[in-house]
């Protein structure tokens, strides 16, 4: 028999017929060691970047995960020290592994507008407001009928505006188009449907 030191705790000594067979003195030590290993920054960094198509500095580096949210952002994760799994968006983890921790209320935005991209040179920090303004500035904001809360369609808005120009009151237009006074008032006054 061979005297073997436990990988998790070298002070623990056990005996084995071959040093290749067992590396841990107990199942408890094996699980503890795997938790430590999987939650180490080096391990997380190695596993994460192995799933990214790393290219030139100016190219997008897409994360190869199949799992993504409804907007196309790749979802990955890492093991916490307690062994539990922490899901995180891939581009956010790329930023954290490159530059360090970031606050929960801070967003990681893309310069390239490519959701799977994890190139740290394409990522920057901002607030939720910055994220919305970036979307509006780049003309990726949903408009008209594509807005989930839209009550009217484009032809209704055009009809409502024309009737308003002809002198019909909002109450009449509401009954005609079977919608609320607020929806018609906002559309006619240009508070909503500004793009047409």
Image (cartoon, rainbow, N blue to C red):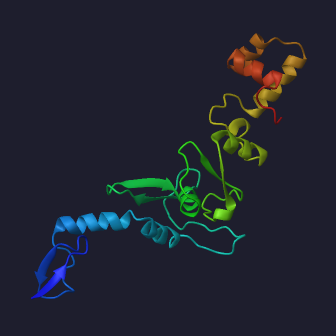
At x 21%, y 75%, the residue is 6
The percent position of residue 74, horizontal first and vertical second, equals 54, 58
The percent position of residue 184, horizontal first and vertical second, equals 75, 20
The percent position of residue 114, horizontal first and vertical second, equals 66, 59
At x 88%, y 13%, the residue is 167
Q: Is residue 19 above or below residue 66?
A: below
Residue, far front: 11
The percent position of residue 111, horizontal first and vertical second, equals 71, 57
Q: Is residue 191 left or right of residue 97?
A: right
At x 67%, y 45%, the residue is 131
> Does any portion of residue 160 appear in the rendered image?
no
Q: Is residue 35 left or right of residue 141?
A: left
* Residue 177 picture quarter: top right
Q: Is residue 184 left or right of residue 33?
A: right
* Residue 186 picture quarter: top right
* Residue 38 picture quarter: bottom left
Foreground pick, 134 / 1: 1
At x 68%, y 61%, the residue is 122
> Does any portion of residue 143 appear in the rendered image?
yes
| Quadrant where the image shows the N terminus | bottom left
């Amino acid at each position: 028999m061979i005297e073997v030191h436990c990988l998790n705790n070298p002070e623990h000594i056990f005996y084995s017929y071959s040093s290749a067979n067992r590396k841990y003195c107990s199942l408890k030590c094996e699980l503890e060691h795997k938790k430590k290993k999987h939650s180490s920054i080096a391990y997380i960094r190695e596993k994460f970047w192995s799933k990214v198509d790393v290219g030139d500095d100016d190219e997008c580096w897409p994360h190869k995960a199949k799992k993504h949210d409804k907007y196309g952002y790749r979802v990955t994760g890492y093991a916490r020290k307690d062994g539990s799994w922490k899901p995180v968006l891939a581009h956010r983890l790329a930023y954290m592994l490159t530059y360090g921790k970031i606050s929960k209320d801070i967003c990681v935005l893309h310069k390239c507008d490519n959701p799977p991209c994890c190139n740290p040179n394409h990522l920057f920090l901002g607030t939720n407001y910055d994220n919305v303004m970036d979307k509006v500035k780049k003309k990726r904001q949903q408009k008209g009928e594509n807005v989930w809360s839209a009550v009217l369609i484009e032809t209704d808005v055009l009809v409502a505006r024309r009737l308003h120009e002809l002198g019909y009151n909002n109450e009449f237009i509401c009954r005609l188009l079977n919608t609320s006074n607020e929806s018609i008032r906002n559309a006619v006054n240009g508070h909503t449907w500004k793009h047409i």
